[in-house]
Image (cartoon, coloured by chain):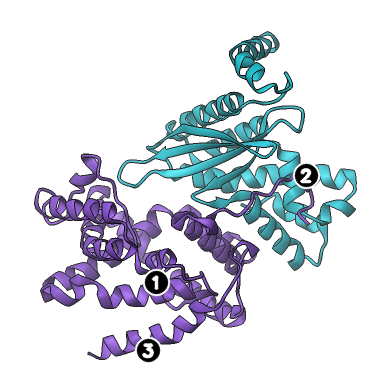
Amino acid sequence: MPRLLQALALVSGLFLAACSQTDPTAGYNDPLESANRGVHAFNKGLDTAIVRPASKAYGTVLPKPVRQGVSNIASNLGEPSNVINNVMQGRLANAAHNTVRFVANSTIGLAGTFDVATAIGLEERDTDFGETLHVWGAQEGAYLELPLLGPSTSRDAVGTAVDFVLNPVETMFHDDVRKVQTATNIGSRLGDRNDFSNTVDSILYDSEDSYAQTRLTYLQNRRFKLGGSEAEVPYIDPYEDPYGQ
Amino acid sequence: MASNSTRRHVLAGLTSAGALLAMGAPAQALTTQQASALIGKVVDEVNTVISSGQSQDRMIAAFEKIFARYADVPIIARSALGVAARSASSPQMNAFTEAFQGYMARKYGKRFREFQGGKIEVSSAKQVKSFFEVSTTVRVPGSAPYDVKFLVSDKSGKDLFFNLIIEGINMLASEREEIGAMLDSRKGNLDLLIRDLKTAG
């Protein structure tokens, strides 16, 4: 199980960082900025050379309904992991919701190709171990940009590693299912890169400081999704304070 | 146009009169209902643009009109420029505001264009301090709904929105960071920034 050991090493290293106290309302905490900027330059180069052209090809070759099917299969294979996290979060209603989604989409939805659950009012409620750590009271920690995986925080990086290890599809399902999961995950990511190319290109290529824009966009969006006190940063009131001091 | 807007104000005044009396608020203050109605008009116009199937350039021109009419562009521009706005001359501020308006239309017009095939609806509104937060939901087939919030104020003398929060991402905060970075890399030269902003976004 070398993969498990690697993941555990990553977890233990990052856990210390995740435990460090930060004030989430202060905008961001980025003590590793110079290292992060290096990783950002690498990721951006990878996007320019491979991911962006591949996503364009993916979006051109495959019609929208096929791309939707691929992304539905990927989401469906993520449901067992969602359910485990829902249980650990104590959100049992969500655990039941996602279990029903998994059963309905895996059967009537033809192995997850069609999201029939959403059609009957059971919308997607995605979660991850980073959110579980948040529910358990772990602080956001430092901002991180991870190679290949992109923007994260020390808490979310631990979450990603734990999700990888705990994912029932990885540990309990047949090899072929794992291959389908890997392939559809890549397809789904390329599809998203293509569907949101305007926004992604605007952040990565049109902005003056793509690192700063990526950091701000990721952290604000992540805090919004997790909800709670971290999302409740007071609004800027430009009428009270027109120069932002 | 003039008689139309007068009538609209009278009607808005009549419908909110009861609520105002109950709250004891001054007669001219903006209400949750009015803020919500303003954003209702904005999203109606945005919906028309994103369902029109026009070219990107035409859509951006249409978004700029909506932005100029319903947003408090001068205060957004001033806030994005930050401390540098203090030492700017008034012709510089005018030129900056004009360039900023076009830049915002190009940048955010492209993002709203990603909602093509979808529809935006006002879902709720509430007062936050001295302004109003109007929440809208963007429904695009095949993806989970998006949350877009507009912040509305009447402090300019008109009811206008001054910020936009798309899935938690705050437009004012992003633009402060971005305009600040642009100014830094031009060594604080505002005229250079204005020149480059005319084609940025």
Of circles 3 and 1, the one toward us is 3
The residues tagged by marks 3 and 1 sit, at their Cα atoms, a distance apart of 29 Å
- Whether tag 2 and tag 3 are in contact, CB under 8 A, the answer is no
Residue sitting nearer the eye, A75 or A61: A75
Q: Is residue B155 left or right of residue A101?
A: right
Of circles 1 and 2, the one toward us is 2
Residue sitting nearer the eye, B141 or A90: A90
Mark before the other along the chain sequence, 1 or 2: 1
Vertically, is B93 above or below B20? below
Kindly identify the residue that appears in the image at 51 percent across and 38 percent down: B135
Q: The purple chain is which one?
A: A
- Whether tag 3 and tag 1 are in contact, CB under 8 A, the answer is no
Q: The cyan chain is which one?
A: B
Q: Do labels 2 and 3 share a chain?
A: yes
Vertically, is A158 above or below B168? below
Give the labeled residue for mark 3. A9
Q: Quadrant of the C terminus of chain A?
A: bottom right
Q: Are marks 3 and 1 on the same chain?
A: yes
Give the labeled residue for mark 1. A50
Mark before the other along the chain sequence, 2 or 3: 3
Give the labeled residue for mark 2. A240
Amino acid found under the numbered disc labelled 2: Glu
| Element on which disc 3 rests | helix
Residue B141 drawn at (x, y percent): 32, 41
Whether residue B139 appears in this view of the structure is yes
Mark before the other along the chain sequence, 3 or 1: 3
